[in-house]
Amino acid sequence: MTKMNSGPSIAARAMVGLLAALWLLAPAASAQEDRTANSFSSDWTLLAGYQDGSQALMVLPSGAIVSRSSTAMYRSDDDGDTWTMLPNPPDGVAIAADPVDSQVLYAFGMAGLERSPDGGATWQQIRAASNPPPATAAPFAISSDHRQLFLAEANQDIQRSPDAGASWQQIYQVSQSGSPCMPTITMLIPHPTDGQRLMTDAGCYAGRDFGHGLQQTRDGGRTWSQFFPTAQEVNPCTLVGGQGSQANRWYLVGNPFAPGVPAALLRSDDDGATWNQVLQTESAVQRLCAVAYDPTNPDTVWVAAGQTPDPTLTGVRASSDAGRTWSYLGRQDIGWVNALARAADGSVLLAATNEGIWRLSF
């Protein structure tokens, strides 16, 4: 297993015990090993009650599951048996549901960011669109305590609202000083339990960086520090962790930073101070964004390819030992997976695909 440090200033704060050190010296799991083994008895079924593609999944604290397609957002309160389409504003598409108040929805339209306090019955603009307006919805996040909104604009800066969109302030600006680089903001990730904490890939990157990094704020944007370093040969796509029985455990899936470079899953056991690669995919996996884990048993983690020309590499891979070993979970012919989500009670795992949502019951 390859150990990667995020830099002396961060590593100096990390205290890793002897057992953890021995674990980190173990070799990284190969995506080729144990490819046909399957220790799970259930299998995937395509949900008949969901009639759209799914780009993203969100599990609310209430246990409700929200799915977002390219044109609408849906909610299920019965682990996916039935779904209700949430109303869109007249000129936009709903993109997020408040994690605490299920009646509060957010949407992007040509005019900008909109908010509904009544389940989509009425909408009001809370942030005008940048000029020119983005071709797709800008990265947007709601803090876990639902007291703050975060919005990325034009790949240049991050705005924060502490009052449901009534006012906004810039909390991060991408610097383009120095050599030529490409300003980027594709991820805004609120901490699952700390409402003041946010992670983002905001930065200005070039090929010399060998991959994007993540920055974090622990105080609502007043100060920033490194969470995941550059030069790991991946561009981060999805981050999960920070809660449950091991709140310092995180899993990050990253796409290849360049053609021919493998995608990877990385794990941190010390709240982002150090990271270790626990899965390296085959080079034919061109996109890896789907990841989920069990917060009550954080050694259990699932990943799935989001794009590959090789049908033998589709399906969900599972590890019950924090990435030491892997096997495919059930049938593999479920297509490219955009997102994974574990139900709040752990009874089912959902896989979002362009053809619909697949479900596996435990």
Image (cartoon, rainbow, N blue to C red):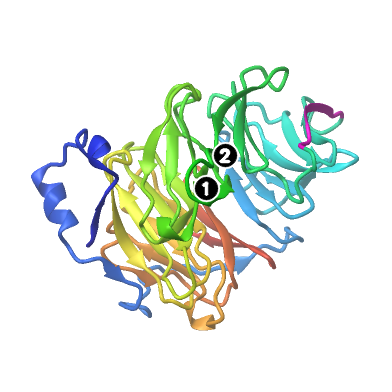
Q: Residues within 10 Å of mark 2 (few under 14, many from 20)?
A: some
Comparing 204 with 61, the one in front is 204
Residue in the picture at 25% in, 65% down: 28
Residue in the picture at 57% in, 47% down: 183
Q: Which residue is mark 1?
A: 343
Q: Position of residue 182 (x, y in %)?
A: 56, 51
Q: Which residue is mark 2?
A: 63
The quarter of the rendered structure image containing the N terminus is bottom left
On residue 17, the disc is none
**Up-down relation of residue 59 to residue 233 (above or below):** above
Q: Position of residue 158 (x, y in %)?
A: 59, 33
Residue 210 in the magenta stretch? The answer is: no
Q: Amino acid at mark 2?
A: Gly
Comparing 28 with 257, the one in front is 257
Residue 124 in the magenta stretch? The answer is: yes
Q: Is residue 335 rendered to the left or right of residue 90? A: left
* Residue that lies at the very extreme toward the left in this rendered image: 18
The range drawn in magenta is 122-130
* Residue that lies at the very extreme toward the right in this rendered image: 90
Q: Residues within 10 Å of mark 1 (few under 14, many from 20)?
A: many
Could you give the CA–CA distance between mark 2 and mark 1, rounded to whole angstroms? 7 Å
Name which quarter of the figure residue 49 lies in: bottom right
The quarter of the rendered structure image containing the C terminus is bottom left
